[in-house]
Every structure is written in structure tokens, then in C-alpha cells.
Amino acid sequence: MLVDDESITLDTIQIFLEDAGYQHFVLTSDAREAIPTLERERPDIVLLDLMMPHVSGFEILAYIRGNERFEHLPVVVLTSSSDAPTRLRALEMGATDFLAKPVDESELVLRVRNTLNAKAYQDRLANFDRLTGLPNRQMLVDRLEWALNQARHAGYHGALLHIDIKRFRRLNEALGPALADELLQHVARRLATEIQHDPVASILLQAGSISELSRLGGDEFALLLSGNLRPEQIARIARSLLEAMAIPFRLRSQDLYLTFNIGIATFPEHELDTNKLLGNAGVAVRSLQTDLSNANGAFCFYSPELNERAIDRLDLETDLRHAMERHELRLYYQPKYDVATETVIGAEGLLRWKHPQRGYVSPAEFIPLAEETGLIVEIGRRAIEEACGQLAEWIANGRDPGVIAVNVSVQQFREKSFVDHVRATLSRFGISASQLKIEVTESLLMTEQEQAAKLLGELRALGLHLSIDDFGTGYSSLSYLRTLPIDELKIDRSFLVDVDSSTDSAAIVRAILALAHSLDMTVVAEGVETLEQLAFLRAHGCDACQGFLFSKAVPAAEYQALLPQLVTV
Ligand code: C2E
Ligand code: CA
Ligand code: CA
């Protein structure tokens, strides 16, 4: 924190210190503001001019030293007077060091560095996060207690924003720890900068408001806001933070797009206790993580209903474990059709959960839950076993079921035994590998590049078919794709929705078709619901399609009933 009535001095010092790598400055040119600002910002070090109008630096120094809270706060006084008495007086009053004006860059940096390296500051390091330099969780809890007290006494309203990077775990593994750390530093810096900018800053300019960013750990950050803040102002701050974070992060000449979620717990509406508040913000942010509809990041206020939903999810998790034991999960089969001949060429196995009380639970709901809890590994193994067992049964019944595809999640892919399990299951049921297809999403391929290439190679060597699911929603590059042994590409349903009305979607689908065919891959369009879509696909040479126009996913027996058609063609 810099206190000086001359703004030129403030600016110069900031530039010098920034060049030396310091961050997060608070500049105060009106000495009357110094004490409230100090209380609010809790700086690591104060650079204080002694000669200022209205309030002298000596008064501020006396306040600091007379206050237990600031016992360890280093204060470097600035003085243009070279007279010994002034300096002596300042040192007697408890100044840590002094610096002559006009400020010399190297002297300034040296003084600041020495002061911050001194013991008093080292003690404080326990409160700061090493990686980002932000206050850590311990410090946040401390500040939160203070803010809640303030709110209680001054009638303030505030909020705790829990900021989280969506799917960071995958990103972390893809980038490796060093780059991931670098990315987190970028994120911390951008958050900190944004909080100092319009329109966030203008909302926070109100008297008495504070904003304090901290790192909770991992990819989780927290922003504490307090003052006379109305919910819509808090929402505006959250929205503009999301906007700022949507700009790609440049990391070693690569652009990374991150998605952020913000969970907001306001006070004093809900419980006034720090733990509860942290917990509520966490519930709010987690409710967003499991929401599939917010691809671009979102914020959400905590509510008791959300809490109920969180509890509900816990129940669902328990039920899912039971579902496996009770065999409530079954594969249904959605036929894939050849576009030219409209005959069945195979099917995609899709899980269905018939819950004894809740009825039918959608995979869109329980697959993400299974992925979060790790249950997907076991669920996925069983899906592969069920598909193979079913293939054997159809064949035994004298049918040709075509190629059956099974979806595979990233966690399954990471299991060392994955390929072995596939191989063992095929031989257990006496199935040829060429009858089984594995669908992996484009995003899995992007986050697991090295591992994916290796595993896909092994699966291909076994003789399996490989398919890229949800194509068009990730960011894969052509040069990368051509290195993978993929034979099928599935155009994501979202492009099909308006393919016959939107020139954008039509252009994307045509481009994907051209790209896939140039790489000798076949193309399956997902989610075909209308004859117009089918006509478009046929006109542009799409190979296969699946969708409600033909059939939804059906039980094994119903699929088998479709199979004779295949034999007659
Ligand atoms: P997905 O792999 O993209 O599967 C296609 C989804 O689109 C299925 O939803 C299917 O029922 C639906 N669909 C098919 N045709 C149409 C259509 O014409 N219109 C519309 N609106 N939707 C259509 P479902 O069965 O709810 O599955 C959702 C997701 O759950 C799947 O997306 C897949 O990612 C996951 N999933 C399902 N079964 C498994 C499994 O055994 N293992 C794993 N790891 N994931 C699975
Ligand atoms: Ca699929
Ligand atoms: Ca898909």
C-alpha cells in the first residue's frame, strides 16, 4: 500500500515495484483515506509519505503502531527532507525503514525486498498461498469472520463467491503439473486484475466495501465481498468476472479456453457462521458442475433448495452403488442406419437405469455422477461385458447384429487394465473384436493426447472399431486426428438440430464430412429427427445416421427383431 499526496510519486513507485515483480498495489493519495483503506485492505507493507496535507504520515504511523492488529506490518517512510531529526522521529515511532525522495529505483526495490524478507513478514507467509501469492484459506476464514461481524454490526450485506474451473482435473493431467501451475497463476492474476476494473470496481467503490480474493486450494478461488451490496450488484460482479475469464489464456503460445463456475452464498441472509457460508458457496458451485447445460460457465446463488438437491444427489450416489449390485442398469440399443440403403448396420449401446422409486433415471444424470465418484469404472466394465454377452446371444439366435458400439469414459481409459479387460471379455464370450466398437468423446482425445494415442493403438491392434463421439464440440486439430487410428466420426447432435435452416450448421456438417472422408473415416450423424435432416445428410454423402427418426434406444429383444431386415438386403 502506497500513501502519498503526489500521484506522480505513487505511479513511479508502482512501476518500479511492478518491474521487480511485485503485485496487487493499493494507492492512496488522500491521507484522510489512509486508515480506512489500511483496515480494509490489510496490506503486506506500507510505503508512507510523512508530509501530506490534512493528516500527516506521523499520525498514520502512530495509529498503526498503536494497534495490535498491525503489530507486524512493516512501514517504510518516504521523506524528501534529508534532515536527521525527522528520520529519527519516524524510527522512534516504529517505522521499519525509510527511503529518500525522489525515489531511486534500486534503493526502493532493495528496501522493500529486505523488509519483506524480515522475520515479521515470514510469519505472515503462513497466511498466503505460495503459488499465486493470494491469501490462503486460513486467511480467508479469518477475514470472513471479520466481515460477518462487520455485517452484523454495520448492517452490511456481502457475499462469498466460490470460483471454480470446470473440469480442471482433466486439464491438469493433460498439461502436467508445471504448466497447470502456470495456468493457475494466470488465472489468479486475471481475477485480481478484473476485480480492480470496471464495472466490478465501480460497484465496490462504495464506502466501506471490501473485496478480497483468495485461493482455497487447487483450482478453487474465493472472492469475499462486503459492503452495502445488493444481490443484483453481486450478480453483476459475477457476470463480469465470467466474461473476463472467458477470454482464452495464452500458455506457451497455446490458447486455452477455460470455463468457470461461481457459487455465491450471501450474508447475513443465511447462517452467520464461516463454515456454513463456505459450505453453502460450495454447494452452489457444485450444483453448476453437474449441470450439463452451462457450457460457457455460470453463477448460481445458494438456496436451501440447492442444499436439498445436494442431499438428493448424495442419495442418488448411494442408490447408484446399490443399482450395480441389484443389476438395475441395462444396456439398450439404438440402431445405426446406412443412409443410402436405410438398413441397420449396428447399434450403440446406451445405459438405462430403472430405479425402484424414482423410475427411469437418465444417463445424462447418472453418468456424470458415476464419473465423479469413480463408479464409472465398474459400470463401464459391466457395459462392455453386457454388450459382448448380448452379441453372443444374438449370434447364437442366428442373427447378424452388426457392429455394437459402447461408450467409454475417460476414467475407464485411464485404468491400466482396460485393454486387458476388453480382450478377456471378447474371448470369454467368443466374440470377434471386429464386432465391437468403442466410442470416445473428442474432448477425451484432447485432454489425454498421449495416453489416448497409445490405448487406441492397442485397441486397434486387437481389431476393434474406434469412433469419435460428439465431434465438433471439442478443439481437435486435423494434424492430431490423422495420427489416431480412428474409423468413425460422429457429428454431434447440436449441429443437426438446425442443419436444414442454418447456413452455419450446414457448413460445419459439410466441412466435417469432407474432413472425415479425406482421412478415410466414415461419418455417423447423431440425433436425426426429421426427414429434412436425412435428406440433407444423403445429399452430402453422410454414411450413417442414428436418431429418433428411425428409432430410440430399445431393449435387446426389440433390436434383435430389427435384424432380419439386415439379412434380406
Ligand atoms: P451419447 O453417447 O452422445 O449418446 C447419444 C444420446 O443422444 C443418447 O442419450 C440418445 O438417447 C440420444 N439421442 C439419440 N437419438 C436422438 C435424437 O434423435 N434426438 C435426441 N434429442 N436425442 C437423441 P442418452 O441415452 O440419454 O445418453 C446420454 C449420454 O450418456 C451418452 O451420450 C453417453 O455419453 C452417456 N452414456 C450412455 N451410456 C453409457 C455407457 O454405457 N458408458 C458411458 N461411459 N457413457 C454412457
Ligand atoms: Ca455415444
Ligand atoms: Ca454423442
Image (cartoon, helix red, strand yellow):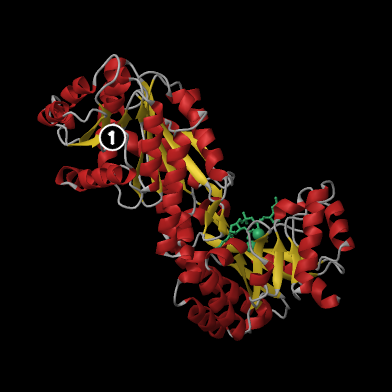
| In the depicted structure, whether residue 52 falls above or below residue 466 | above
Along the line of sight, the residue nearer the viewer: 477 or 340:
477
In this rendering, would 549 be left or right of 484? right
Q: Quadrant of ligand 3?
A: bottom right
- Give the x, y percent position of residue 532: 86, 52
Residue at image point 53% right, 80% down: 425
Q: Tag 1's secondary structure? A: loop
Quarter that holds the N terminus: top left
Residue 385 higher or lower than 289, as above or below: below
In this view, which residue lies farthest toward the front?
Answer: 83
Tell me if residue 114 can be seen. Answer: yes
Q: Is residue 379 visible?
A: no
Residue at which label 1 appears: 43
What residue is rendered at 54% in x and 40% in y?
Answer: 244
* In the image: residue 93, left or right of residue 32: left
Q: Residue furthest left?
A: 92
